Amino acid sequence: MATRLVIFDLDGTLLDTIGDLAASCNHILEQFGHPIHATDDYRMFVGNGIAKLVERALPMECRAPEYVERVRVAFVEYYKAHIADYTQPYNGVSQLIDELRARGVQVAVASNKFHEGTCSLVDKFFGLESFVAVYGQRAGVPIKPDPMIVNEILRDVGVMREEVLYVGDSGVDMRTAVAAGVRSVGVTWGFRSREELIEMGADYLADRAEEILNLL
C-alpha cells in the first residue's frame, strides 16, 4: 500500500538541536550551582521530554520531583529565548519534505519537545503550513513511546496505519512506531546509535535523508 503520510520526530531527525539544548541546560545548571556537561553527553539525556532531560542533567542527589520541576521551568524560559541560536536542519531534510509534498505525501511532526517549542522550530525552519499536523508534548497527553500522539495524527489526517511511515532517530521513536502499528525508519544522523535503532525494532535504516524516498 502506498505511503500517504510520513510522521517525523523533530530533535535529532529533522533538526540538529543538541547545541541549543546543551547550552541552555548548562546555563541553568550553572545558575543553580551544579556541574555542567559536555555537549555530546546531552545526546543520551534527550528523547523523553524536557523534564527527563533536566532530571538526567542534575546530580543524582538533586533529582527530587519538586526540584526537577523548578529547574525545568527555568530551563524552558531560557531555552525559548535561545531555541535557534545553533539549531539547523540536517542535510537534505528540507529537500526531502519538499519532495514528499510534491509527490502528494503528507507530512507531520510528533515530538516530545514541549508543544510551543516544537511549533516554533517547525515554523522557523520549514513553515507550519507545510505540515498537516505538528504536535509536541502537551498537558494530558503521554509522551512517546506511548502511541497516543501518533494515533491522534492518524485520526486528524484520516489515514490507515498501513499508509504511514514514522521517521525518528532514537529507540523511543522505534518503540513508538511499534506501539502504534506503523512502519518505522531509523535515521542514523541523529542523537542515538544504529545499534539502538535496530535493537528497538526499526523496520528500515536511512543514512541520508533522500533514502527515505525509496521506502514510500
Image (cartoon, rainbow, N blue to C red):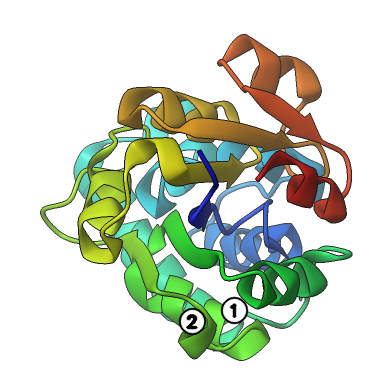
Q: Is residue 213 above or below residue 76?
A: above
- Image quadrant in which the C terminus is located: top right
Q: Secondary structure at mark 2?
A: helix
Q: Could you tell whether 70 is left or right of 197 in the image?
A: left
In which quarter of the view is residue 193 placed?
Answer: top right
The residue tagged 2 is: 80
Q: Secondary structure at mark 1?
A: loop
How far across and how far down the image is residue 146, in percent?
A: 28, 33
- How many labels sit on residues? 2
Amino acid type, residue under disc 1 in the picture: Ile
Q: Is residue 38 visible?
A: no
Instruction: Please give the name of the residue rendered at 58% of the width and 39% of the height, measured from the top-left corner.
Output: 45
Q: Residues within 10 Å of mark 1 (few under 14, many from 20)?
A: many
Q: Could you tell whether 67 is left or right of 103 in the image?
A: left
How far across and how far down the image is residue 49, in percent?
A: 41, 48
Q: Is residue 211 above or below residue 183?
A: below
Q: Residues within 10 Å of mark 2 (few under 14, many from 20)?
A: some
Q: Is residue 26 above or below residue 167?
A: below
Q: Could you tell whether 12 is left or right of 148 in the image?
A: right
Q: Nearer the viewer, residue 188 or 70?
A: 188
Instruction: Please give the name of the residue rendered at 61% of the width and 68% of the height, measured from the top-left corner.
Output: 24
How far across and how far down the image is residue 110, in percent?
A: 42, 56
The residue tagged 1 is: 83
Asked if disc 1 and disc 2 are in contact, CB closer than 8 Å, the reply is yes
Amino acid type, residue under disc 2 in the picture: Lys
Cα separation between marks 1 and 2:
5 Å
Q: Is residue 136 visible?
A: yes
Instruction: Please give the name of the residue rendered at 52% of the width and 65% of the height, measured from the top-left corner.
Output: 107
How far across and how far down the image is residue 136, in percent?
A: 36, 63
Instruction: Please give the name of the residue rendered at 53% of the width and 83% of the height, measured from the top-left corner.
Output: 130
